[in-house]
Image (cartoon, rainbow, N blue to C red):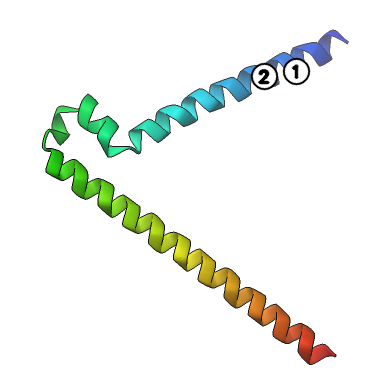
Amino acid sequence: MAATVAMETDDAGNRLRFQLELEFVQCLDNPNYLNCTLSELVKAQCVKFIDEQQILHWQHYSWKQMRLQQALAEQQQQNNTSRK
């Protein structure tokens, strides 16, 4: 019984640590955050450029994933149709 409680406590602690570390990594991923914390990105124009490039990257990634899923769905539909 005590071992079960200890495991649950460890799981809760690990979950909290993961959430905190994830939040920190997400902050590092934000150019605006880096602008406030690092002397390397002192020019707002540079931060804006990086932010825009990041958005464009994720838009392209999302579009690419959507097209891939559509192609797979169409292929599965064709396979199901050809079997009948």
Q: Quadrant of residue 70?
A: bottom right
Inspect the image, locate mark 1, and give the three-letter code of the amino acid beneath it.
Glu
Inspect the image, locate mark 2, and give the three-letter code of the amino acid beneath it.
Ala
Q: Residue furthest right?
A: 1
Kind of element beneath mark 1: helix
Q: Residue at x 62, y 22 (%)?
A: 14
Number of the label disc, if any, that sits on residue 8: 1
Q: Quadrant of residue 5?
A: top right
Q: Is residue 65 left or right of residue 81?
A: left
Q: Quadrant of residue 3?
A: top right
* For the residues bearing labels 1 and 2, Cβ distance under 8 angstroms: yes
Tell me the CA gap for discs 1 and 2: 6 Å
Number of the label disc, if any, that sits on residue 12: 2
Q: Quadrant of the N terminus?
A: top right
Across and down, in percent, residue 50 comes to 23, 47
* Other-residue count near label 1 (Cα within 10 Å), few / some / many at <14 / 14–19 / ≥20: few
Q: Residue at x 67, y 19 (%)?
A: 12
Q: Is residue 68 left or right of residue 41?
A: right
| Camera-nearest residue between 28 and 45 | 45
